Structures are given as structure tokens and as C-alpha cells.
Image (cartoon, rainbow, N blue to C red):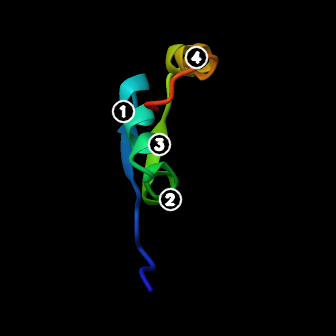
Amino acid sequence: MLTNYSKTEVVADTSSLISLQTGGVLELSLKLFDISIPEIVVTELEEVAGYDDTQG
């Protein structure tokens, strides 16, 4: 077990979060990295969530 493990800090944009989710690795990424999401990205994700897009 790692005792002095520090997560790498990452700032995510909208497209990277969508890509991680589409690729099925968003949950894992959230566990492995300390991901900061700017407020504008949250707003964009809320807008995108309303789209009827079968491709992700």
C-alpha cells in the first residue's frame, strides 16, 4: 500500500471530461487524479447534458 501517495493535479476542460466518460474511464480518472473543473466547464457540461446525442 502506498502511504505517501499524492494525486497528480489536473485541470479538465469540457471535451476531455466528455472523452473520458465516452471511453468509460472517467470514474477511474477521478480516483487516480485530483481533477479541478472550472465553473465555466460545469456550465458547458450542463448545457451538453441536454443534447440528444447517441455518439456520446
Q: Amino acid at mark 2?
A: Lys
27 displayed left or right of 23 = right
Element assignment for label 2: helix
Q: Check disc 1 and report the residue beneath it.
A: 16
Disc 2 versus disc 3: distance between alpha carbons? 14 Å
Mark 4 touches mark 1? (CB < 8 Å): no
The mark closer to the camera, 2 or 3, is: 3
- Which of 34 and 41 lies nearest the eye of the viewer? 41
Q: Residue farthest to the front?
A: 54
Residue where numbered disc 2 is placed = 31
Helix, strand or loop for disc 1: helix
In which quarter of the view is residue 51 placed?
Answer: top right
Q: Which kind of residue does numbered mark 1 sit on?
A: Ser
Above-or-below relation of 30 to 52: below
Q: Amino acid at mark 3?
A: Gln
Q: Earlier in the sequence, mark 4 or mark 1?
A: 1
Task: Identify which amino acid the numbered label 4 is placed on.
Answer: Tyr
Between discs 3 and 1, the one toward the N terminus: 1
The dot on residue 51 is 4
Q: Nearer the viewer, residue 49 or 17?
A: 49
Asked if labels 1 and 3 touch by Cβ distance under 8 angstroms, the answer is no
Q: Nearer the viewer, mark 2 or mark 1?
A: 1
Q: Residue 10: which quarter of the image?
A: top left
Of label 2 and label 3, which has the lower sequence position?
3
Q: Is residue 11 left or right of residue 45?
A: left
